[in-house]
């Protein structure tokens, strides 16, 4: 409080009493504000006269000063068998309360929380130390030392409910400034908010834009910790399963000449003075890898679509899980791999990542995902839709709504949230799709659905250069922009097929989430390029 | 031969004999060319009068006509215990020779080769069938049926030397057009070419540009099959080891607002009417993931550098292996992970991918990679260089040449091709590098070297927002372009550090290759954007 205060002197008689009273009121207000500010202003250093001064205060900037050999314990590892141990924990201040001689901290690390108690008994802690702890801003990072004890009652508000820490040291490592929203507010389920409202309590809700603007805070909620660990798990399982099937991982260029696969939704740029664009998929390159005799390849990488669609399921940049494989005679060989891959992936998620799934469900409850390998012809799907009264074009594409309707019909009949619809009309598939041998209206292609929404497009590809040129022309793709790709099929090309999967969609639909922005760490849509 | 030929009639007496002679010569030449063409023109279909007509000829386009249940055998699986079996193999025609009643095919699949013999005995094959096989263009894809037999002598020219196939069926699945170069020419080692030259034989050599222009052909050489399977292996091991250490895989946006980490070498583009650029690394985002409490994260993804350097080790797009981790007190915690990661990776390559390494070495022989965990201070490195007579700036960066010289000195003293040089001068590191606590001339940073070339840059990062702004200003990075990144450190930021590894460099240097274009599937450099 560096501001000089006007002394509240008695007014001279007869001198402008009204103004004086106003000044008095202003001074009082100022003094109150100063008091509030003093109270709010948190101490950052220990009281130098305190005999326990070394036990608390803000740490020096951690700057690789020395290697002390100290060992930090993970919050999530604290349990019954930790009781009696001295521990050092680095965690966030998730909650803080207490007055006078007590301070209760909830310490959070990932999705694990534990209670820590600072009590001014003059031995473990002093009164200024308790005050220091009480004034720690939420989300600050602290090093807490103490003894693990069994609380009288389970600490139901914490994940590590059968222990608490009796604190004898607390140092702030990184102090948090004012928060744009509270992590607890960002962590509540709709159900909790609704029930509280019914009971007359109003919780702050955090809107999606606010969350995404401060994504580094939003990602700290247990559900988000779960979502992004599941995203990692899906990639891990995808690769484990494909590597075991003899696939080879590849990395293909995202900067390409020409117009990618054609179409308008392309980001264009200048590459050393040449026109270039960002790959809309690794399609052309993974096919060239097949012509290069790698046999079975996969790639996990970014995919760019300059689409202006503002929907719950489109992004301008997302992560593609792609694979491509030589086939001997039929695209069913690709379907075999797809089914085996996804059945094993779902089983892996269930068996190995149940904790992550539970973290997501704690805020966004969802029906368990049911999966069986079901294959239906596109024409069968059309019949099911027509029988249910939907007006659909048997040689057109399905709309998002009819896809959902078909998903519901399939779920009803086959009790699965996962199925393959194959032999799509040729007119709705890209030029590189192999036409059906027996009917040019159809193609050797398929989509895969989760909870009635498309997650995969795939097909047998055209591996004959002459037919490819014919198909490109028919689809108005300028052949000169894809000449190298076309040429790659002239030197002996293995028949092949493959798929492209959207990672964010898989996680979104597996967890029954309602928006793809929830499963993209830093989403890119037509309105968002930051952070 | 649709061209009508001028009959070679005797010239009328007295009529321009010179011209007539010339016409005769022309006609003879034409006839000879026609004969050559007829010989060269390969039959694509069986002779309809041949009782064995069903045994050969080009297949109909493979178009998912039916699921026959036929089983194809891998060439690489053929060995002594296959003898006597009937097999069906799909492979490339790697070599073809024979006249009259014999045809010897070398069939290639990946890096496995086997000899197949077609003999016109009237039972297994007919004369027209042998002729069909003799005229198969190299690199065509064929379905070969036959019986596995033990040859009288080992077929030394093939990888499956203890067997050959007695062919009773051959159908071409995809016919190769004229090749821009021969795979055998592209597969020879420099040593082979030199020795042949000494013996008076001249082999065709295939220049790098020619290879890269037809990369889908070039990649079929055994060495390239090995290189790209090793690249897959490096990624697999990188992830396996980090996942076991509790790292989480992330995917961060490549399209970003502002100017990435600053600097000129940025690809710029328009994003829905806003200026944007391609990420020069996942640096800012992986750090935000740490501020988001993911603890330990890694990413494998494309990295874009609009650098005009035409060197053996720079690309405009490469694959970055990045990780970032919270640390407790010292960047040595990051070095511990780096050493453990690479020692385990090298051991994994040696133990699990020896066949791939042998394939590379068959064309590009290299000294086995020796690796020990050695850490040297930058200042120690300078002293070693100075002691060896190099004129180096103790607070400047090392040039490529001094790096190589230091690598040689380290190899001599420590017998390792791998080492870490740490505590670099602050002036040569990016703004987000944590300065050394005891001397502002130095920083908590490091590089990692393989065979004397840098493969990794890493450091403890600045996790304090105020210091970060100060460092950005000092390094002339406009703070407004990185505001969200700076803000992410204001809400409690864990001390952290990490590294960025160039995948193509790791494979190149492990195998002692001389050009990074050899380890990028479809390289992008200042002159190349295609295929």
Image (cartoon, coloured by chain):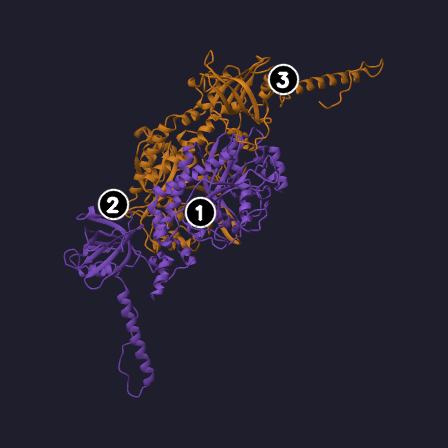
Chain colours: A purple, B orange
Closer to us: A143 or B128: B128
Closer to us: B261 or B228: B228
Mark number displayed over residue B232: none
Where does residue A102 sit, x and y in percent of width and height? 20, 61
Q: Residues within 10 Å of mark 1 (few under 14, many from 20)?
A: many
Where does residue B235 sit, x and y in percent of width and height? 40, 36
The residue that appears at 24% across and 44% down in the rendered structure is: A67
Q: Residues within 10 Å of mark 2 (few under 14, many from 20)?
A: few
Q: Which residue is mark 2?
A: A66
The residue that appears at 28% across and 85% down in the rendered structure is: A12
Q: Residues within 10 Å of mark 3 (few under 14, many from 20)?
A: some
- Could you tell whether A442 is left or right of A455 in the image? right
Q: Which residue is mark 3?
A: B50
Label 2 near label 3: C-beta < 8 Å?
no
Where does residue B282 sit, x and y in percent of width and height? 41, 45
The CA span between labels 3 and 2 is 86 Å
The residue that appears at 33% across and 36% down in the rendered structure is: B341
- Could you tell whether B530 is left or right of A93 in the image? right
The CA span between labels 1 and 3 is 58 Å
The CA span between labels 1 and 2 is 42 Å
Mark number displayed over residue A504: 1
Q: Chain of mark 3?
A: B
């Amino acid at each position: 409080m560096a501001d000089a205060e006007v002394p509240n002197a008695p007014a001279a008689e007869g001198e402008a009493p009204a103004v004086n009273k106003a000044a008095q009121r202003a001074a009082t207000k100022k003094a109150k504000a100063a008091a509030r500010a003093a109270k709010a202003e948190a101490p950052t250093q220990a009281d130098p006269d305190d005999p326990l001064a070394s036990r608390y205060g803000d740490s020096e900037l951690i700057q690789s000063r020395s290697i002390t050999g100290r060992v930090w314990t993970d919050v999530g590892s604290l349990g019954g068998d930790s009781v009696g141990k001295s521990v050092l924990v680095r965690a966030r201040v998730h909650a803080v309360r207490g007055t006078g001689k007590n301070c209760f901290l909830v310490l959070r690390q990932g999705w694990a929380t534990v209670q820590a108690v600072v009590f001014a008994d003059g031995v473990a802690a002093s009164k200024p130390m308790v005050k220091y702890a009480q004034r720690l801003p939420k989300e600050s990072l602290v090093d807490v030392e103490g003894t693990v004890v069994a609380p009288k009652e389970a600490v139901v508000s914490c994940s590590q409910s059968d222990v608490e820490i009796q604190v004898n040291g607390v140092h702030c490592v990184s102090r948090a400034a004012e928060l744009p929203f509270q992590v607890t507010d960002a962590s509540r389920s709709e159900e909790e908010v609704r029930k509280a409202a019914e009971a007359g309590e109003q919780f702050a809700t955090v809107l999606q834009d606010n969350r995404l603007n401060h994504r580094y805070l939003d990602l700290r909620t247990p559900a988000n910790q779960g979502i992004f660990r599941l995203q990692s798990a899906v990639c891990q399982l995808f690769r484990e399963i494909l590597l075991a099937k003899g696939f080879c991982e590849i990395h293909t260029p995202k900067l390409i000449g020409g117009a990618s696969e054609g179409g308008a939704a392309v980001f264009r740029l200048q590459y050393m003075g040449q026109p270039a664009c960002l790959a809309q998929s690794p399609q052309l390159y993974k096919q060239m890898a097949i012509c290069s005799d790698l046999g079975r390849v996969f790639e996990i990488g970014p995919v760019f679509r300059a689409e202006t669609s503002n929907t719950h399921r489109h992004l301008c940049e997302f992560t593609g899980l792609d694979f491509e494989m030589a086939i001997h005679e039929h695209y069913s060989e690709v379907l075999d791999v797809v089914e085996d891959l996804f059945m094993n992936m779902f089983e892996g998620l269930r068996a190995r990542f149940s904790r992550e799934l539970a973290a997501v469900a704690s805020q966004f409850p969802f029906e368990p995902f049911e999966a069986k390998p079901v294959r239906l012809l596109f024409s069968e799907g059309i019949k099911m839709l027509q029988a249910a009264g939907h007006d659909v074009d048997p040689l057109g594409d399905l709309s998002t709504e009819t896809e959902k309707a078909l998903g519901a019909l399939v779920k009803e009949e086959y009790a699965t949230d996962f199925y393959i619809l194959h032999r799509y009309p040729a007119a709705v598939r890209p030029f590189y799709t192999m036409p059906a041998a027996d009917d040019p209206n159809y193609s050797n292609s398929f989509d895969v659905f989760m909870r009635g929404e498309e997650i995969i497009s795939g097909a047998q590809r055209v591996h004959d250069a002459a037919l490819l040129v014919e198909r490109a022309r028919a689809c108005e793709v300028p052949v000169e922009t894809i000449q190298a790709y076309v040429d790659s099929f002239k030197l002996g090309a293995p028949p092949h097929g493959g798929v492209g999967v959207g990672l964010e969609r898989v996680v979104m639909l597996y967890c029954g989430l309602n928006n793809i922005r929830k499963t993209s760490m830093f989403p890119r849509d037509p309105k968002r390029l930051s952070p």
